[in-house]
Amino acid sequence: MYQAPLPPEYATLTTDDARTRIIEAKRQLGTRIVILGHHYQRDEIIEHADYRGDSFKLAKDANRHPEAEYIVFCGVHFMAESADILTPDHQKVILPNLAAGCSMADMANLFQVRNCWRDLEKIVREQIIVPVTYINSAANLKAFVGEKGGTVCTSTNAPKAVEWALSQGQKVLFFPDQHLGRNTGAKMGYDPERDMVVWDPHKPLGGNSEEQISTATFILWKGHCSVHQRFTVEQVEAAKSKHPNIKILVHPECPIEVVRLSDLNGSTEFIINTVNAAEPGSAWAIGTEINLVNRLAKENPDKTVFCLDPMICPCATMYRIHPSFLLYVLDKLVAGEPINVIEVPQKTKDFAKVALDRMLTLV
Ligand code: 13P
Ligand code: SF4
């Protein structure tokens, strides 16, 4: 989506000025707005959030204030779309920077998924395939899943969602993140070599033979997160050799070799809760986005907390929610001229809501 450049007076604001003005705009708007902030947002944004959370929690938090006219979503595009789908029509969802997308979500589109589905249906005939889309996907893919009897999942409830899907059919088409799909299946006891195939949308039959597809339980879309795919076995080994009592805690978007070597894995909310509840003096190497890790280290001064990747890995698109962008959308609201409203078309909303509502029940 096209994001117009900020007016020069916003683009050149100092952090302190932006902070003071955001606080004032928020005060003027009062209960008319709720600000949601994903854990990967920078500190200068998180400090203004009424609720912070992972994708699952924020999808629920979006509904907490039906009296608010506007939900200002400091996160990425698919999160704002999900909030729009899950909230009543009188509430408008605003994304402060329209260029805040998700590179993983962009790795699957409706045309490709429909083609894949058509091919799969031809091959598996008697078997039922249930589509599961990670919440990191466009609204029209969530609608596709809703229409085909599947569900959305997040990193919080992926095992529950896949378990549910396999109670409805024999195969799961999991998109767009192959890693979350693989890690989830492996957690449930499936063998990635024997029970899973990867579907590359740029190859005929996803790069598989009909037989491979017929025998697989999981068809994993060839998508990934550019932040989490960077974590490696070598980084885990280096952290373990430097800190003998280190605990490795990673997000399930990481490659399976890394997840297998970790002590624990889970959503961003799980990562935060785990470290917050840990013994003073304990040491944690975290495999997820750097803004979260740095904040976690700051909020837990009695523990050693650092990022598994010494080269540091920010989510470039989450980072696009700069305080100046937040201030600009708030000032526009104060002026009665809402901008950057995310509106999912009604037809898409209806089916997508079926899949998102199902997600919320699978806990
Ligand atoms: P969480 O739902 O765990 O916050 O993950 C969202 C995300 O985009 C991770 O890359
Ligand atoms: Fe998307 Fe990865 Fe950024 Fe999450 S961290 S929003 S999956 S690019």
Image: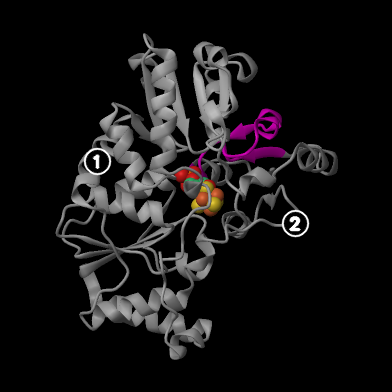
Gap between marks 1 and 2, in whole Å?
A: 39 Å
Question: How packed is label 1: few (under 14 Cα within 10 Å), some, or many (20 or more)?
Answer: many
> Residue 319 appears at what percent x and percent y?
53, 65
Q: Which residue is mark 1?
A: 353
Query: Residue at image x 44%, y 15%?
Result: 123
Is 177 situated left or right of 92 in this image? right
Is 228 situated left or right of 43 in this image? right
Position of the N terminus, as image quadrant, is bottom left
Is 119 situated left or right of 238 in this image? left
Looking at marks 1 and 2 on the same chain, the residue that comes earlier in the sequence is marked by: 2
Please name the amino acid that badge 1 sits on: Lys
Q: Check residue 311 in the rendering and tell me which mark sits there, or answer none.
A: 2
> Residue 57 appears at what percent x and percent y?
37, 46
User: Which element carries disc 1, helix, strand or loop?
Assistant: helix
Region rendered in magenta: 247-269
Please name the amino acid that badge 2 sits on: Met
The residue lying furthest to the bottom in this view is 9
Viewer-nearest of discs 1 and 2: 1
